[in-house]
Image (spheres, rainbow, N blue to C red):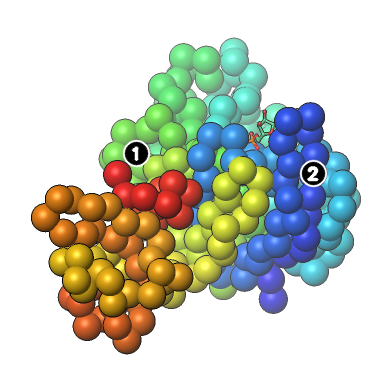
Amino acid sequence: MNAIEVRNVCKAYQNFQLDHVSLTLPEGTILGLVGENGAGKTTLIRLILDLARKDVGEIQVYGKDDAMSVPSFRNEVGVVLDEVSLPPVMKAAEIGKMMGMIYSAWDQVVYDGLLSGLKIPQDKCFKDFSRGNKMKLGIACALSHHPKILILDEATSGLDPVVRDELLDILLDFTRDESHAILMSSHIVSDLEKACDYIAFLHEGKLLLSEEKDRLLEMYGKLVCSREDFEKISPEDIIGKRDTGYGMQCIVKRTDVTRGLNLQPVGIEELFVVMVKGDLA
Ligand SMILES: Nc1ncnc2c1ncn2[C@@H]1O[C@H](COP(=O)(O)OP(=O)(O)OP(=O)(O)O)[C@@H](O)[C@H]1O
């Protein structure tokens, strides 16, 4: 079953349009949303969470239309946004009590376990937490009401590599349960490359692709070759190119021709940049 299904969703603001976006998040998987500033990642996430109203299209969560507008469904989805917004003068234990009043499925034992496992300070008010600890507390809150889906919008930005790695471990652990799923956006594409099973590229409100990560990495490759070899490649198989003066560097589709030219693997970040710009940096 699909955890999230978005079909032909549009949303227009004055100077921006999310344009017929369709994507699928299967159960047991993590989907990473990659896009430049203003590409529409947060807009799409807000539509899925029913925090904004779509103009047209369909959004299903576990097969239910507009599920997030049903209050009882909110236990099912854990949300961590770029800025974790919790009462500034509350300590972790008080925040847990407050969450227990909000979520019927709140599990104090899970919460306490996460507080100690993630070494979240118990003696400080939330406003005095480091950004890393704020994020960890946000994740602890999101996980303690037994959600089936986690939605994270830029949750790893501004965190050091060690904390990011800890968070990625938590996320991977969460999707060991095959009925769980995660949708996450991040500008740190290496995090998405590490954790995600599916990758979606969003550019200026349009979905460029949504694909299984391994298949994506199989579909494209990087090439350094002579101009003569470059001429053999069909133009529609060239995603981006650069004339180095000595020869050509390019990102191309894997075909019988390009495979014979010593194709190297390409990273997700480089692939996104070249798809958007058309040229290699
Ligand atoms: N409520 C709103 N009213 C008007 N315009 C909006 C509103 N919300 C978002 N936008 C516009 O929609 C566009 C997409 O914004 P969005 O926050 O979805 O991008 P993003 O991909 O999340 O960017 P970033 O990576 O910088 O967070 C932007 O141009 C933004 O100004």
* Residue at 78 percent of width and 60 percent of height: 8
Q: How many marks?
A: 2
Up-down: is 54 above or below 259? Answer: above
Q: Earlier in the sequence, mark 1 or mark 2?
A: 2
Crowding near pointer 1: few (<14 within 10 Å), some, many (20+)?
some
* Residue at 42 percent of width and 52 percent of height: 278
**Is residue 34 or residue 99 the one in the foreground?**
34
Q: Is residue 210 visible?
A: yes
* Mark 2 C-beta closer than 8 Å to ligand 1: no
Residue at the spot of label 2: 11
Question: Label 1 to label 2, Cα distance in Å?
Answer: 35 Å
Q: Which mark is residue 163?
A: 1
| Three-letter residue code for mark 1 | Val
| Three-letter residue code for mark 2 | Lys
Q: Position of residue 26 (x, y in %)?
A: 62, 70
Query: Element under label 2?
Result: strand
Query: Element under label 1?
Result: helix
Q: Are discs 1 and 2 less than 8 Å apart at CB?
A: no
Up-down: is 60 above or below 189? Answer: below
**Is residue 37 or residue 132 the one in the foreground?**
37
In the picture, the quarter occupied by the N terminus is bottom right
**Relative side of 107 to 260, left or right:** right
Crowding near pointer 2: few (<14 within 10 Å), some, many (20+)?
many
